[in-house]
């Protein structure tokens, strides 16, 4: 009837605890895989198409996807906590529509810019609060946010509105040149600054580490006394901010506001993050991976453009296949780790 | 000596249940204090109150003479109360050093100082006699070591009160010994340690004093040397000693089964990396015990028999027919049921009620197109809730609100209800109190008398000895010996086999 504790085993010498079950650089494997893929894709492009090797072709990938990069960085934070943010595409639409409408109405750029950034941030804050306080699944809460933002922008204007504001046009045309015909736009600079800050925050701050901890095990994080609720809300707020900043970059890029901008962009962002090696279950991944993921998506588009005779839907097909491959890869890597 | 912690008249009410009813509790600095009680006695609730997970509905908490009230784990930690839970509550994806320091990382200008953190982590672990690579990801270490890391984290919070909730349930003997060394060292440094364990021997080895709870009430506070084990047990379950012994007698009476075609026969069955090829036969009415240390291949063997893992060697015969059991579904169709050791992740569905959990396997066996009539459900569930004394005896309560032991009983009921011919039970009594243990053991014996074959997997040798007709001893993922249970077989004999690794 009485418990007998586990029987004695032959005594080992102390300290006994040093044996590792496996060597874990498995965390780097997905990022390395993406890097290899990127190099292979680039090599294939250079080999097959004339002019593909121009520096500007590569830089254009950045130029054309700077807004996606910013959005994907915000998404990285969200997915690292094990969540998802479906609203980002719609927030872009809302941002561009509000921007174009207010600028057309003669509001000064100095007011419009902070205002639209605030709108996206507050939306993110709201979704984060709903997720945390009402224990709503992130998928549902951000889906609602997506409908709300998209609906609002449709309500404001159904048509595409051109932006003619001087400041906006200046920003859109700003180029940083590195020689003959080699340049990047302001968007790229902003995006790279965002990436840099995000990488530093994730690696060197408490907030960043809490993001990883929550993704690893939210219940444990709570019991360890970490500010789980605050961090979670902050992550969606951040994603909302990144989405509206992405929207501003998008309005620089297209010089227009349109309620149908950014349709399906949330899925591109998620795809980029996942291809970049961030685990959808959270807790593992790097911003650098996300950058690589965005580059992979951009390079696919470039290749299809160079090929010339392919329907642009091939982008989607290839992205779909890549997603499958990478999700399976993640699975294999994490399973091997077990 | 002044009390380090004093709780008076603590009251905690959940909808429909009074979990704690005026409980007094105190901890002295520099003592190891065991909190004893059955499952559902209120131990976990008391700990959660103390760690700020639950707010109290009445009573007072004083810490070092000052009245306190916690609104969350963070406040409790800041006040110097640290907790290490049964399940390792750390983040598996972070490094060892981070797990120790997260939330309290050394920083300069808001920037985490990684090298400083690693240095301090290594120093702290060295103090606990642990030699780990602090930069390694936590889940690259075994559960036992993760547990030690959790303690290192708790200790670094400059704990004045350290709560260890079932810290030893996943540790082997030498690891337990090491844990105790650490506990004694901390006690000598003046830390008040609250220790919860179901292993009475461990409690008697380490605890200075103990507090006994039953049904949410305080039974008493005792010095360990003043309270013999049998008295402690009777205080915990509130039954007289004779009643206890009676249960034991009943369980022992299991008679030897008749022979015939075995229900299950394994011929050189094995799976690389999990368990070496083994022979095993199980007859109707026979209880076969699997004994061996943690990680010796007990669970792996059981999973092969149930078709949960695919063997890559040998064959499995059911009723003498070489029909491979390829999946748990096929196993269930052949009347084999498997009650998993890991009730949290592989068995219980916390969001469903007790009734729904119990009915699950039977419904699955019938197919979803033929729902079990509600009246029949209630009838069956009622019967098993009574038979297993599941508490609270409310079939409509969510399973996640039940205590661990009662969850285990629900899981058992789920499989009993389909009346299997062979029931594989993996660690049915781990983390369960003495009273519930006796009930489950008695039930197993009864079932076997009724003709059911049982494969009983347990780390507790006494239990295996008491119930089994024959005992299969495992060591290092190999079945090393089969013992017919008799007067000449006792725990020492099995331990010898495990230690020496005799070959059949």
Image (tube, helix red, strand yellow):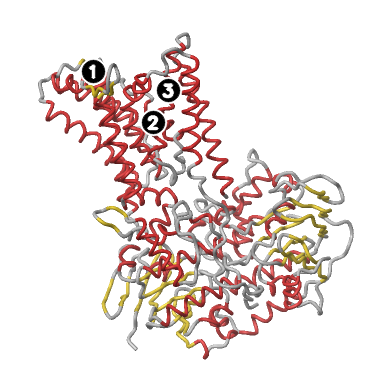
> Badge 3 local density, few (<14 within 10 Å), some, or many (20+)?
many
> Badge 2 local density, few (<14 within 10 Å), some, or many (20+)?
many
Disc sitting over residue A299 in the figure: 3
Q: For mark 2, give the secondary structure.
A: helix
Instruction: Decide if residue A86 is on the left or right side of residue A257.
Output: right
Front one among B245 and A157: A157
Give how far across and how far down residue B143 sits, in percent: 54, 61
Which chain letter matches label 2? A
Which chain letter matches label 3? A
Screen quadrant of the C terminus of chain B: bottom right
Q: Which residue is mark 2?
A: A269
Whether residue A132 is situated above or below residue B278 in the rendered picture: above
Disc 1/disc 3 C-alpha distance (Å): 25 Å
Query: Quadrant of the rendered structure where residue B282 is?
Result: bottom right
Give how far across and how far down residue A159 sits, in percent: 25, 15
Screen quadrant of the N terminus of chain B: bottom left
Give how far across and how far down residue B492 sits, in percent: 73, 78
In front: label 1 or label 3:
3
Between disc 3 and disc 2, whose residue precedes?
2
Which chain letter matches label 1? A
Between disc 2 and disc 1, whose residue precedes?
1
Query: Quadrant of the rendered structure where residue B201 is?
Result: bottom right
Q: Which residue is mark 1?
A: A256
Disc 2/disc 1 C-alpha distance (Å): 21 Å
Q: Are labels 3 and 2 assigned to the same chain? A: yes
């Amino acid at each position: 009837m009485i418990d007998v504790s586990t029987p004695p085993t032959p005594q080992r010498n102390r300290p006994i605890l040093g044996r590792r079950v496996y060597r874990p650089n498995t965390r780097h494997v997905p990022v390395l895989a993406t890097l290899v893929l990127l190099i292979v894709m680039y090599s294939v492009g250079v080999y097959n198409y004339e002019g593909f090797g121009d520096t500007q072709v590569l830089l254009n990938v950045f130029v054309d996807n700077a807004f996606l990069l910013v959005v994907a960085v915000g998404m990285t934070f969200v997915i690292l906590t094990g969540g998802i943010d479906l609203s980002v595409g719609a927030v872009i639409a809302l941002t561009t529509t509000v921007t174009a409408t207010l600028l057309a109405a003669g509001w000064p750029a100095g007011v419009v810019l902070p205002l639209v950034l605030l709108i996206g941030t507050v939306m993110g804050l709201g979704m984060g609060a709903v997720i945390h306080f009402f224990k709503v699944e992130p998928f549902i809460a951000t889906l609602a946010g997506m409908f709300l933002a998209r609906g609002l922008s449709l309500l404001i204007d159904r048509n595409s509105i051109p932006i003619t504001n001087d400041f906006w046009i200046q920003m859109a045309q700003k180029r940083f040149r590195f020689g003959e015909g080699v340049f990047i736009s302001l968007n790229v600079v902003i995006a790279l600054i965002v990436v840099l800050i995000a990488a530093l925050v994730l690696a060197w701050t408490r907030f960043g580490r809490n993001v990883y901890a929550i993704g690893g095990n939210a219940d444990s994080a709570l019991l360890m006394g970490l500010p789980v609720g605050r961090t979670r809300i902050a992550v969606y707020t951040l994603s909302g901010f990144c989405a509206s900043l992405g929207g501003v970059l998008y309005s620089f890029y297209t010089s227009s506001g349109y309620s149908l901008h950014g349709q399906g962009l949330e899925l591109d962002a998620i795809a980029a993050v996942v291809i970049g090696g961030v685990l959808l279950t959270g807790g593992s991944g790097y911003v650098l991976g996300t950058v690589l993921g965005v580059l992979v998506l951009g390079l696919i588009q470039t290749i299809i453009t160079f090929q010339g005779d392919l329907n642009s839907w091939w982008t989607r097909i290839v992205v779909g296949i890549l997603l499958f491959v990478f999700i399976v890869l993640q699975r294999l890597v994490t399973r091997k780790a077990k | 000596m002044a009390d380090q912690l004093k709780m008076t008249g603590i009251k905690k009410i959940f909808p429909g249940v009074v979990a704690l009813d005026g409980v007094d509790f105190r901890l002295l600095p520099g003592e190891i204090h065991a909190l004893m009680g059955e499952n559902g006695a209120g131990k976990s609730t008391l700990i959660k109150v103390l760690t700020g997970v639950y707010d109290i509905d009445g009573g007072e908490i004083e810490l070092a003479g000052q009245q306190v009230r916690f609104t969350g784990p963070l406040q409790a930690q800041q006040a110097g109360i640290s907790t290490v839970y049964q399940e390792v509550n750390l983040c598996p994806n972070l490094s060892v050093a981070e797990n120790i320091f997260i939330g309290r990382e050394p920083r300069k200008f808001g920037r985490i100082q990684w090298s400083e953190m690693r240095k301090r982590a290594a120093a702290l672990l060295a103090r606990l006699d642990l030699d780990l690579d602090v930069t390694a990801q936590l889940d690259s270490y075994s559960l036992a070591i993760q547990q030690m890391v959790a303690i290192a984290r708790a200790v670094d919070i400059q704990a004045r009160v350290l709560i260890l909730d079932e810290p030893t349930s996943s540790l082997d003997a030498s690891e337990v010994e090491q844990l105790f060394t650490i506990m004694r060292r901390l006690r000598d440094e003046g830390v008040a340690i609250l220790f919860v364990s179901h292993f009475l021997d461990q409690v008697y080895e380490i605890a200075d004093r103990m507090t006994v709870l039953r049904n949410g009430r305080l039974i008493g506070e005792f010095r360990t040397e003043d309270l013999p084990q049998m008295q402690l047990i009777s205080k915990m379950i509130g039954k007289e000693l004779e009643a206890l012994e009676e249960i034991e007698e009943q369980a022992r009476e299991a008679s030897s089964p008749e022979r015939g075609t075995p229900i299950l026969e394994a011929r050189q069955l094995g799976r690389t990396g999990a368990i070496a090829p083994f022979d095993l036969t199980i007859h109707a009415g026979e209880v076969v015990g699997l004994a061996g240390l943690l990680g010796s291949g007990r669970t792996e063997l059981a999973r092969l028999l149930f078709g949960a893992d695919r063997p890559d060697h040998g064959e499995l015969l059911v009723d003498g027919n070489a029909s491979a059991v390829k999946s748990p579904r096929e196993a269930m169709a052949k009347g084999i049921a498997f009650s998993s050791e890991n009730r949290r992740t592989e068995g219980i569905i916390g969001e469903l009620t007790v009734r729904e959990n119990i009915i699950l396997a039977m419904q699955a066996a019938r197919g979803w197109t033929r729902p079990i009539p509600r009246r029949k459900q209630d009838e069956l569930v009622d019967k098993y809730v009574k038979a297993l004394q599941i508490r609270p005896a409310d079939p409509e309560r969510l399973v996640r609100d039940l205590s661990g032991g009662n969850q285990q009983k629900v899981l058992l009921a789920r499989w009993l209800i389909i009346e299997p011919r062979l029931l594989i039970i993996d660690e049915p009594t781990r983390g369960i109190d003495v009273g519930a243990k006796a009930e489950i053991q008695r039930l197993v014996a009864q079932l076997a008398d009724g003709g059911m074959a049982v494969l009983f997997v347990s780390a507790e040798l006494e239990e295996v000895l008491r119930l089994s007709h024959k005992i299969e001893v495992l060591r290092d993922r190999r079945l090393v010996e089969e013992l017919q249970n008799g007067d000449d077989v006792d725990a020492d004999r099995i331990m010898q086999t495990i230690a020496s690794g005799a070959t059949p």
